[in-house]
Image (cartoon, rainbow, N blue to C red):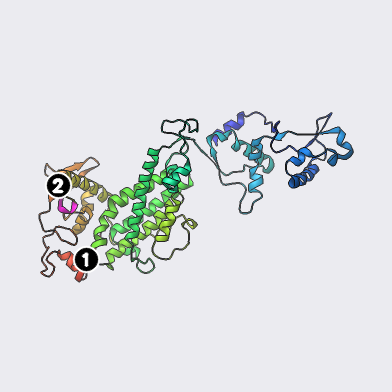
């Protein structure tokens, strides 16, 4: 707005006529002596318009003046100048918005390259104010131009053009759309095969996340199987609260045309909140509990709402993928196409218990680092072959302590204990991002359950199932386990 205003203040008068062999003619008759327009010019406009409508633009250049002016013809000359092309494009608010059903004036948005502050944006504004007394657009959005990896403008002579059709043929249209949305379009947009391949990697992470979500809703009917929001397992309720908060942020980014912020938020959620935290933790619940158990249905309820939100967030950008996911979701869809409704309607979640999951997630990152270090050193093969001792202080201690026996399901280890930070041994691993926590990783010495892969003292304690832990036996033959937190 400021840039356009500054240019308008400094612009000279606009000469709208051009002397060219092609273009839209200026259909007026001018007096040979006074250079004044014919007094009936407005009436003549209508007559000439009908003739041009039938015979095309050349009808004006071919007509005889006497056909319209009769005896006055000898006093007037026919103007053969054509309109400046900026006048042509600048009046599209009248020729397009004002004459086509389903469109409205003014337009919500005019979108063009940054050079159009001197061109189309100005000519549209000037003609609209002259005709309607107001701007033809509610907002302006400008974009930069595409350059190669060296910052050079793309041109055929340089041989550095990457045709969009080639990208769609090799990587798919959604990759092209994701690259555009991920780039700060207000500046020059750099594109190369390397950048497109990185974009493809980002896309695969999002797509694989969606595949996991859909696969783990097999057999789930959202009309009959959903757990009430106030009865969800705590971690599931936390994830629904998170997508509710994220949805608000994402819609604000869309409203501001901050598409790169949308893609960053979407990617961060899939990689960190889902892939690096929630989805890892729920695997034990999904794969080892009874299929119809409350804890498993609670998880599937959360997965359903996560997927429903995710698909709506991505639909303006990853349009084809979003529709594919939409059609694969369980239950009846309210609309055939995901584009019918973009804003997610997320229920308010309560949950069985409240704990500080943000602190717990920070703690889990430190645990993951400690286990990875132990794996690199050859101490353990994976997280379930490990036991961890956590030493914490302050709020993080209380958050971890609240989990009780379910702490090991969050750390994804066969055993997890919690002590005070002052008791931590010298070899404990810590991280500057979480100074109130230290972790010790040990090898799980107990027998491995062949069903859940946890190393437990009670493996083989039920004679008829010598390879299983008591928890798995209960999940197979008994009432099944309950979960409150994770």
Q: Foreground: 401 or 433?
A: 433
| Drawn side of residue 194 relative to residue 121, left or right | left
Q: Which residue is disc 1 drawn over?
A: 481
| Residue 268 in sight from this viewpoint | yes
| Drawn side of residue 200 relative to residue 187, left or right | left
Residue 250 pos. (x, y %): 42, 49
Q: Foreground: 430 or 87?
A: 87
In the displayed structure, 442 sits above or below 474; it is above
In the displayed structure, 59 sits above or below 314; it is above
Residue 300 pos. (x, y %): 32, 62
Q: Foreground: 424 or 315?
A: 315
Quadrant (top left, top right, bottom left, bottom right) of the N terminus: top right
| Drawn side of residue 127 relative to residue 302, left or right | right
Local crowd at mark 2 within 10 Å, few (<14), some, or many (≥20)? many
| Residue 177 in sight from this viewpoint | no
For image coordinates 61% across by 46% down, the residue present is 106
Q: Foreground: 252 or 455?
A: 455
The local secondary structure at tag 2 comes to strand
For image coordinates 46% across by 63% down, the residue present is 334
Residue 239 pos. (x, y %): 33, 55
Residue bounds of the magenta highlight: 383-389
């Amino acid at each position: 707005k400021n840039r356009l205003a500054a240019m308008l203040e400094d612009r000279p008068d606009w000469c709208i006529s051009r002397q060219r062999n092609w273009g839209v003619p200026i259909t007026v008759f001018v007096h040979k002596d006074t250079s004044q327009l014919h007094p009936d010019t407005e009436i003549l406009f209508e007559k000439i318009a009908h003739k041009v409508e039938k015979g095309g633009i050349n009808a004006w250049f071919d007509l005889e003046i006497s056909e319209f002016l009769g005896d006055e013809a000898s006093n007037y000359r026919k103007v053969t100048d054509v309109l400046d092309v900026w006048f042509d494009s600048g009046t599209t608010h009248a020729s397009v918005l004002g004459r086509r059903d389903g469109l409205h004036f003014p337009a919500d948005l005019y979108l063009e390259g940054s050079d159009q502050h001197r061109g189309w944006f100005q000519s549209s504004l000037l003609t609209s104010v002259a005709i309607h007394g107001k701007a033809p657009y509610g907002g302006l959005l400008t974009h930069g131009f595409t350059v190669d990896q060296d910052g050079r403008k793309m041109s055929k002579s340089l041989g550095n053009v990457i045709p969009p059709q080639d990208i769609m043929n090799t990587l798919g249209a959604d990759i092209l759309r994701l690259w555009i949305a991920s780039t700060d379009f207000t500046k020059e947009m750099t594109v190369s095969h390397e950048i497109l391949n990185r974009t493809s990697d980002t896309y695969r992470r999002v797509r694989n996340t969606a595949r996991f979500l859909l696969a783990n809703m097999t057999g789930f009917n959202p009309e009959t199987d959903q757990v009430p929001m106030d009865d969800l397992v705590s971690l599931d309720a936390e994830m629904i609260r998170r997508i509710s908060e994220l949805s608000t942020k994402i819609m604000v980014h869309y409203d501001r045309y901050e598409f790169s912020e949308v893609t960053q938020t979407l990617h961060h959620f899939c990689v960190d909140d889902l892939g690096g935290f929630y989805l890892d933790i729920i695997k034990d619940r999904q794969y080892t509990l009874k299929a119809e158990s409350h804890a498993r249905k609670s998880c599937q309820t959360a997965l359903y709402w996560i997927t429903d939100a995710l698909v709506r967030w991505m639909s303006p950008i990853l349009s084809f993928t979003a529709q594919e996911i939409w059609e694969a979701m369980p239950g009846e869809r309210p609309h055939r196409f995901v584009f019918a409704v973009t804003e997610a309607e997320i229920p308010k979640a309560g949950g069985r218990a409240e704990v500080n999951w943000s602190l717990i997630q920070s703690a889990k990152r430190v645990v993951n680092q400690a286990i990875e270090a132990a794996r690199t050193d050859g101490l353990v093969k994976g997280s379930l072959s490990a036991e961890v001792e956590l030493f914490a202080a302050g709020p993080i201690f209380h958050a971890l302590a609240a989990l009780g026996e379910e702490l090991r399901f969050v750390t994804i280890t066969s055993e997890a204990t919690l002590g005070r930070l002052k008791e931590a041994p010298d070899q404990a691993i810590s991280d500057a991002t979480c100074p109130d926590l230290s972790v010790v990783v040990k090898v799980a010495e107990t027998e491995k359950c062949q069903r859940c892969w946890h190393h437990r003292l009670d493996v083989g304690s039920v004679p008829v199932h010598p390879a299983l832990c008591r928890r798995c036996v209960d999940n197979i033959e008994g009432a099944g386990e309950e979960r409150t937190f994770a």
